[in-house]
Amino acid sequence: MEPNTFILFGATGDLAKRKIYPALYNLFVDGKLPQAFSVIGLGRREWSDESFQANVEKSLHQFSRREAKDAGLVKDFLRVFRYSVLDIDRKEDYLKLLKLTESREDELRIPRNRLFYLSVGPEYFETIAANIQVSGLGSADGWKRLVIEKPFGHDLQSARDLNLKLGKAFAEQEIFRIDHYLGKPVVQRLESLQQANPVIQALWTNRYIANVQITANESVGVEERAGYYDHVGAVRDMFQNHMLQLMMMAAIHLPHDSTIEEVRFKKKKVMESLELLQKGDVVANVIRGQYKEGSVQGKPVVGYTSEPGIAPDSMNDTFIAAKLQLDNSYWRGVPFYIRTGKRLKEKSTRIVVEFKEPLKQSLAKNDDGITPNLLVIDIGPNEGITLQLNAKDPEQKGAYKPVHIDLHASQENSPEAYENLIGDALTGDPTFFAHWDEVELSWQWVQPILNAFEENLVPLHLYAAGTYGPAESDALLAQDGYHWWFDSKPEQNNEISKGVQYA
Ligand code: BG6
C-alpha cells in the first residue's frame, strides 16, 4: 500500500470516535496501514495534537473491537496523529492545512498522496471539495481520493446537483461513496459464494428461485436524530442506499475472477432492469408505516410522534416494505420483497432466498414438515450463510425435518465494515463503494415513491412498536402466496433468527 496522508474532516465528531479511529487502529494492528502514514484531524474545536491523540485513544478504549491494552502499540499508532483547527468556510484554514500536510509529508518522506475523508454533514461536501481544489491541497503530484458518507442527495435532482459539484474537484474514480452495508463481512462474501460454488450459481435463476426477501429490521427508534430522520424517513435513510445495494449484491451474476469494472457493470445492469414504478403503482407495491407506542424487548416505548423533536402530526415513514421486479432473463417473475423499519421486534438484517417446490406434490400431500429450500444469508447481528434442506425425520415415520448446512466459515471477531471500507479506500479498491451510476439509478427508482409519499397517495399504516411492522407488509407477500421467513410467529420455524448454530 502506498504511503499517504489521511485527512479527516469532522475529527471531533461521533462517527470518527465510534467507527473511524477504531477501524484505523485495527488496520494498524493487522499490518494493513502503509509503513509510512500520516493522519491529520480537522475540526472547529481548539484541540492540540496531544488532546487530539488523547481523544483518539479514549475512543479506542470505548469502541475498538480489539482491546487497546498494549500501551506501546497504542503509542506507536497515535504518533502519526496531528490536529489542525478548521472552519469549513475559511480559505486561510485550508492553506494552513496545506502547509501542515506538506511539512508532515516531507518529515515522513512520503509522496503527496492524500485521502480526504468527509465525516461531516452532507451540506458541507460541496464547500469542502471546492476548497480542497482552490487551496491546492488537491493538486499535488500524488493521488487524491475523496471519501464521503451518505446521504448522497435528498432526491434524484439534489443527488445529480451534488455529483456535478463534486465532479469539479474530483473525478468519479477518485470518489469513494461509503455505503457501510457494503463493508459488512457477509455482504462482501456474497460474490464469492456464487463464484466458488457452481451449484449455487446454477440455481441462481427464476427457474429455481421463488422469491427473495431482504430485511433490515431495527429495534431502535429515532434516537437523538429527530432533526435528520424526520426529513428523510426509512425510504431515504435505508431503502435508497443500503437496501438497494443489498438487492444488487443478491441479484448479480458474476463469473469467476470478475474485475472491479465487471462487478460495477453488472450492478448497474441489475438497477437498469428494475421495473420502474409509476406514481400510481406505488400504492400496490409499497407499504408505508410509522411506529406507535408499544413495547420493545419488554420495555414500553413511545410512538414516533411523541419522540422528542418530532411534530405530533408528522407523516414520516419509519417503515417501508416494497415488492420489486427485475425484468431480465435471470429474474423475470421472481419478486424481491424488501423491508426495513425502526422499533421492530428485534434487530436483524438478512437475505432469504426461497426456492421453488416442484417436488412438493409428489413427496407428500399432507402436512409432512416439508418446507421450501432456503438460502439464508444472515448479515447482522448474527453472521451466517445457511442452506436449509429437508431430510427424512428418523424419529417420525413419513415426516421430514429441515436440516441446515452452514456455508459460512465462522469468523470470531471479524473486521468491522469500516475496517474493510477504509482499508479498501486506502488501497484504492472501489469494489465495495457506491458508484455514481448506482446512486443515480437508485434515486431514479425511489423518486416515484418519494412523490407518492409527498402527495399522500400511499396510506401511512401505524404499527405497534415491538412488532414486525404493519399487517399490510405481510399481506404484500400473502397475495403472492408467500410469507416473510423467520418472523417469530409460532407457526414458523424461527430458529435461525435466534442465531442457533447448525450442524
Ligand atoms: C444508517 C442509518 O445508515 O444505518 C441508521 O442512518 C441505521 O438509521 C443504520 O440505524 C443501521 O446500520 P446497522 O449497521 O446497524 O445495520
Image (cartoon, grey):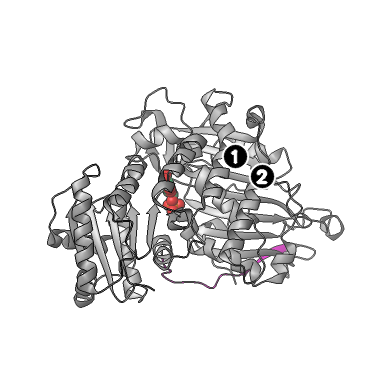
Identify which residue is drawn at 54% across, 56% down. Answer: 497
Q: Could you say where residue 247 lies in the image, as x and y percent from the top left?
A: 60, 51
Identify which residue is drawn at 55% across, 28% down. Answer: 451
Query: Would you call the spot at circle 2 few (<14 residues within 10 Å), some (14-19), or many (20 or more)?
Result: some
User: 326 or 297: nearer the eye?
Assistant: 326
Identify which residue is drawn at 51% across, 26% down. Answer: 454
User: 132 or 343: nearer the eye?
Assistant: 132
Element carrying mark 2: loop
- Reading the image, the residue beneath label 1 is 445
Element carrying mark 1: helix
Boundaries of the magenta span: 401-415
Which amino acid, by three-letter code, is at mark 1? Answer: Trp
Q: Quadrant of residue 339?
A: top right
The secondary structure that dominates the magenta segment is loop
Q: Could you say where residue 426 lies in the image, as x and y percent from the top left?
A: 39, 66
Mark with earlier residue (1, 2) = 2
Q: Are marks 1 and 2 in contact (CB under 8 Å)?
A: yes
Q: Could you say where residue 75 lies in the image, as x and y percent from the top left?
A: 19, 72
Residue 171 lies, with reference to residue 193, above or below; the image says: above
Q: Could you say where residue 332 lies in the image, as x and y percent from the top left?
A: 75, 48
- Reading the image, the residue beneath label 2 is 274
